[in-house]
Amino acid sequence: MLASILRPVALPPQLIGRPAPCDIFDARGTLLQRVGSPVARRAGHSQHPPRVFCEASQADCISSVNPLAQLRAVGENLAHLAAQVDNGRHVAAAELTGLARELRELWALDADACIGYARLHRFERPSVCHAVLAALLAAELAAANGSSPESITDVVGAALTMNLAAMALHDRMFEIAGDPGEKLCAELRLHPVESARLLERIGGIPDDWLQAVAQHHENADGSGYPCGVSRAGISLPARILRVADTLAAQLIGHKTRPSHHWNMRQTKGLQHLIQHVFGAELELLDHLLVRQLMARLSAFPPGSLVRLSSGELAVVNRRQPDTDSPRDAMVFIGTHGRPLEEPRVRRIGLRDCRIRSYVQDELPKLPPYEWQLIWGYR
């Protein structure tokens, strides 16, 4: 079934003018070149090969890069660096900046797969799950604001390290089922300053990155912490990070707060959807940035678990250009209730195949699945 899944690849310069090793498509699935025809030069930055799409079963003919395997490695490396910090060991700036750059490049290659996979896959620590998803959402929002690749890397790095001095504390907070108590709450309020100071001691971290970490819990109305600055005093990277951090927390949830996922009743209008997902947190955030991010993610963001009218469970794997409605979904549990060995494409919109509901809340109860198959990676 992987032959029916399109996945993006970076077109290497050495392939230009040579016979195409497989059919090449655009993001909409329109055939650009047939196998064997000379590969034409396409628009793109000279330093970054243009992106095209191939059938997943043939994509390795052009590139064997697996961004989801590398995304897992980013999570593992972040957990390792956090453990080093917890144990008082040295962490080099190059390790952190390299991790941020790698994640930004993975997002640039296949943002849908990275965001969707981060919503479904569970990294080894809750704090890592949160940081990786927040970093990807921050990249989306920074790109929506026209940020340069270097600036996107900085906000991604800020998201990965915003809790670096308190990753163990965030893991504990995730597991607490009742009132965390005044002591833990006081520790939590200090973590932006402590993480920024830790990064300053490491040295070599860009100023925008440092400021975003220090301000990522400041609120637009001045009610945030640690300094209580308001909108005019909060940098754009920090405001971006605040929105991404909040949305990641809403989507992941924890034992005392259920997740706030997309809801079929709330997808008719963007403002209703925003209010449903963000709730009371919305008043603390930059509303323009919230609208930008939610509009960019669409009514069915990648990684959305849905139940079809057939009774099958599926994942919406890609956003469709110029529309909120998914063209298709990848079925991973059939009508028999058992996981499929490989996902199947179901066209949406036909009379006999519609999306009936979101089922993101069922994720913890589902049997293990190789989620990267949903995007055509092995």
Image (cartoon, rainbow, N blue to C red):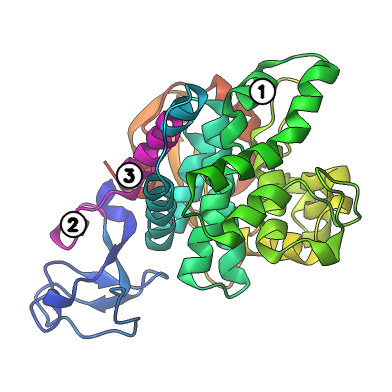
Coordinates of residue 5 in the picture (x, y in percent) = 33, 54
User: In the picture, residue 297 is in which quadrant?
Assistant: bottom right
In terms of secondary structure, where does tag 3 sit?
Answer: helix
The amino acid beneath tag 3 is Gln
Amino acid type of disc 1? Answer: Phe
Q: How many marks?
A: 3
In this view of the protein, which residue sits in the foreground, 124 or 161? 161
Q: Residue at the location (37% across, 53% down)?
A: 102
Taking the magenta stretch, the answer to whether it contains residue 68 is yes
The percent position of residue 105, horizontal first and vertical second, equals: 38, 59
From the top left corner, tell me how far across and down residue 101 is, in percent.
40, 56
Which residue position holds label 3? 70
Q: Position of residue 22 (x, y in %)?
A: 15, 66
Q: Residue at x 35, y 74 (%)?
A: 30
Q: Main secondary structure of the magenta part?
A: helix
The magenta-colored residue range is 56-80
Residue under pointer 2: 58
The answer to whether residue 180 is above or below residue 232 is above
Task: Please rate how many residues cluster around mark 1, counting C-alpha atoms within 10 Å: few if below 14, some from 14 to 19, many from 20.
Answer: some
Q: Nearer the viewer, mark 1 or mark 2?
A: 1
Q: Which residue does the image show at 83% across and 48% down from the upper left?
A: 227
**Residue matched to label 1:** 174
SS at badge 2: loop
Is residue 167 in view? yes
